[in-house]
Image (cartoon, helix red, strand yellow):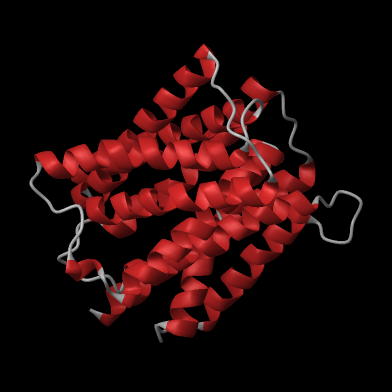
Amino acid sequence: MDNLRGAALMVAAMLAFALEDMLIKLMAAALPVGQIIGMLGVGSAAVIGVILTVQKQALFSRDMLTPAIAIRLVGELVGSMGFVTAIALIPLSTASAILQATPLFVTLGAALFLQESVGWRRWVAILVGFCGVLLIIRPGLDGFSWQSLFALQGVVGLGVRDLATRRVPRHTSSLQLSFLAFLVLIPAAAGLMWVNGSHITDLSPINWVYFGFAVLIGVVAYYGIVSAMRMGEVSFVTPFRYSRIVFALFVGVLVFGERPDTLTLVGASIIVGSGLYTLWRERNVRANAA
């Protein structure tokens, strides 16, 4: 029963993230990307900072000065800026489909940099999954858009973040990590606006609503993931992360009038299928080792 509850929470969290992505894309019609990233950093850091204070956890400590946390923050920064930029510039369904390759990148990185054992079957699954990414991006073909590379930046950055998280000291809580991650987005967003020559734009009433809900939904989604992973078995709950692409497709079609073509849908299916197989294979390997 705990596994089913955990799976339901994970699906709900993925729905919330898809809605947050929708709100970001709606704001991007009127606001510079750098401003959106900075606003999300300020709002989310403020909310999580209040939660940390209520729970009597330190916002900062010397224990946070570790290479793993520094690498994690760089990965979060690169990944978040890439994915938010992708949401603003390309169809939401396309950006979300490419993002589903992140677990495959994590498996690849774990084998190359963390010396984790990955058998030939998972290597094949990783290769097939990245072929799915190429079907979506289509480099060198008429359907290629260089802006889709921002989504690939998101995959690499968030993959580095997840890999570094495995080496973060256990006494540093997930909330503390999230607070630091949102905090570093603020100066980075200011730097992005300076490089792009962007100026701060006044928010209309509707964009204030979008912003408020984006922060609220993002925090709720985060709690949903944490609760899901603690409630059920990780190997059972994790595959339900892929429900995000389903919600993103619905949002893209219903809200933005997107019409994903056949290659995008096939590529997304290949990525999800490869990711699910990799998770299934990893679960079997660990079960046999035990």
Left or right of 62? Residue 100 is right
Instruction: Give me the residue at 24% from left, 67% from top.
Output: 64
Q: Look at 20% across and 52% down and name the residue there.
A: 59
Image spot of residue 267 (x, y percent): 69, 52
Residue occupying image coordinates x 21% and y 71%: 169
Residue 94, quarter of the rendered image = top right
**Residue 145 drawn above or below residue 220:** below
Q: Nearer the viewer, residue 96 or 120?
A: 96
Q: Tell me which corner region of the image, top left, top right, bottom left or bottom right, holds residue 253.
A: top right
Left or right of 161? Residue 5 is: left
Residue sitting at the far right: 142
Nearer to the camera, 15 or 212: 212
Q: Is residue 36 above or below residue 229?
A: above
Q: Quadrant of the N terminus?
A: top left
The answer to whether one can see residue 275 in this image is no
Tell which of 119 and 172 is nearer to you: 172
Number of numbered discs overlaid on the protein picture: 0
Judge from the rendering whether residue 148 lies leftward or rightward of residue 164; answer left or right: right
Q: Position of residue 236 (x, y in %)?
A: 32, 54
Question: Which residue shows up at 63% across the image and 21% down it?
Answer: 254
Q: Is residue 278 above or below residue 273?
A: below
In this view, the residue in front, 42 or 171, is 42
